[in-house]
Image (tube, grey):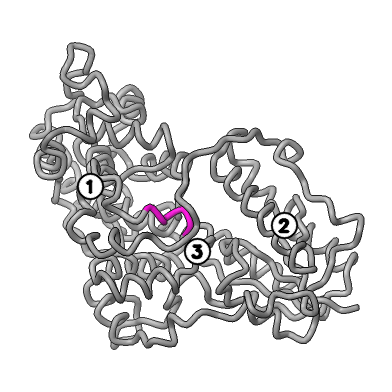
Amino acid sequence: MKITLFWHRRDLRFQDNAGLAAALKSGHPVLPLFIYDQTILEKLAKQDARLTFIFDQVERLAKEAHEAGGGLLARYGKVPAVFKQLLKDYDVAAVYTNEDYEPYATERDTAIGELCEKSGVEFKAFKDQVIFAKNEVLTKNGKPSRVFGAYSKAWQAKVKPEDFAPHPSQRLFKKENLALPHPADARRPTLKELGFERHEQPTPPARLPDADVVKHYDKTRDFPADNRGTTHRSVHLRFGTISIRQLMHQAQELNVKLLNEMIWRDFFMMLLWHYPNTSYEAYDPKMRHLPYRNDPEQYRAWCEGRTGYPLVDAGMRQLNENGYMHNRARIAAAGFLVKQLFMDWTLGEHYFSEKLIDYDMSNNIGNWQWMAGTGVVAAPWFRVYSPDSQQKQYDPEYKYVKQWVPEFGTAKYPAPIVDHKFGRERAIDLIRKGRNA
């Protein structure tokens, strides 16, 4: 019996899933598939909260598929090798999936598409994790916008109610439309068999945030001490355990500021797809050869939250402990590394990529390059945030700081590792020289 494989990646849900809905209409029984990609996993530490989260979601999907009368296939290995074996083991009519816009993912999907074509198997990818992607929102000249304000305006002029309409994947996910894995494939790999140990970090439930939180988001989002000031749904957006359409529709109805913040996500994904080189180098050629400093001791102090700037240190300690950092603290911490310490933004981007449970390459790279003034987004390279000013404005009573830096205000808390004025002037001077070299 011919089947359609539906390949889950950043869409770990059966509800409102664009590619899955299309697969369930393909005319062939659908077998959901998840691949533990060896190429990605071999770069991770043996205790990784993201992999634990993914593993739990895959197990949840397997349970839901079983309850619906079907099954879920989970394999481990290099993706091309896994698909070559799958095409031998199953009579596959088509492989359906949802698009992924990161450089590695686009190269991988191109290779799998070519493999399927050689085998006479249809390969189709659908837009699911954004509202608009690739070339759907461009300037009048047909180019990607460098200015977020113009992009957001065009995005909001283009969006229609049907763009938020849910796909009927949950309704179609029933026994008559599903396939079962071969008995030998029914068993899924355990975390231990994947070479990992369980490492959990707290995550909110995979459901829409409370309406009251969304309604007040514009007034509370900048204050890190307020735990209900943001939606805390970034991890679910990253792994697709909640539909982006549901979240953005809620934001459109309740809080335009939250909607605008989520449009940044579409914007950064579009930019990374157009400029994959920005994953490792500055978009601006003049900013690619700056004389960044190399000071392992100061870098280690930044990583560990020992800079002597309380907002920066609180953010880094929150990150290290639970894999999350409030956005205002991310701004302070990133700005401090790239300007006051004048270190390469890729160092910070890499550290965040290892620690953030909600790590999203396009968002992370876009924001780091924005802070460094090197990116596609028009941001003045000579802008330098003051950690002290940020502290006074967004955590004036040091509530957030005291939560994460208990020794603050005692003799145990370190003095600043660099003077703000000195660091600011040094950064501006070195960037100016680097740009003109």
Horizontal side, residue 257 vs residue 174: left or right:
left
Residue shown at the point (21%, 18%) measured from the top left: 414
Say if mark 2 contacts mark 1, CB within 8 Å.
Answer: no
Give the crowd class for mark 1: few <14, some 14-19, many >=20 residues within 10 Å: some
Horizontal side, residue 253 vs residue 68: left or right:
left
> Which secondary structure, mark 2?
helix
Q: CA distance from mark 2 to mark 3?
A: 18 Å
Magenta stretch holds residue 142: no
Residue 383, percent across and down? 14, 50
50 w.r.t. 241: above or below: above
Q: CA distance from mark 2 to mark 1?
A: 56 Å
400 w.r.t. 254: above or below: above
Foreground label between 2 and 1: 2
Q: Quadrant of residue 344?
A: top left
Tell me if residue 291 can be seen: no
- The amino acid sitting under disc 2 is Lys
Q: Which mark is residue 308?
A: none
Foreground label between 2 and 3: 2
Q: Which mark is residue 63?
A: 2
Residue shown at the point (45%, 76%) measured from the top left: 134
Horizontal side, residue 343 vs residue 57: left or right:
left
Give the crowd class for mark 3: few <14, some 14-19, many >=20 residues within 10 Å: many
Foreground label between 3 and 1: 3
The magenta region covers 232-236
Residue 59, percent across and down? 69, 52
Q: Which mark is residue 434?
A: 1
Mark sitting earlier along the chain (3/1): 3
Q: Which residue is mark 3?
A: 242
- The amino acid sitting under disc 3 is Ile
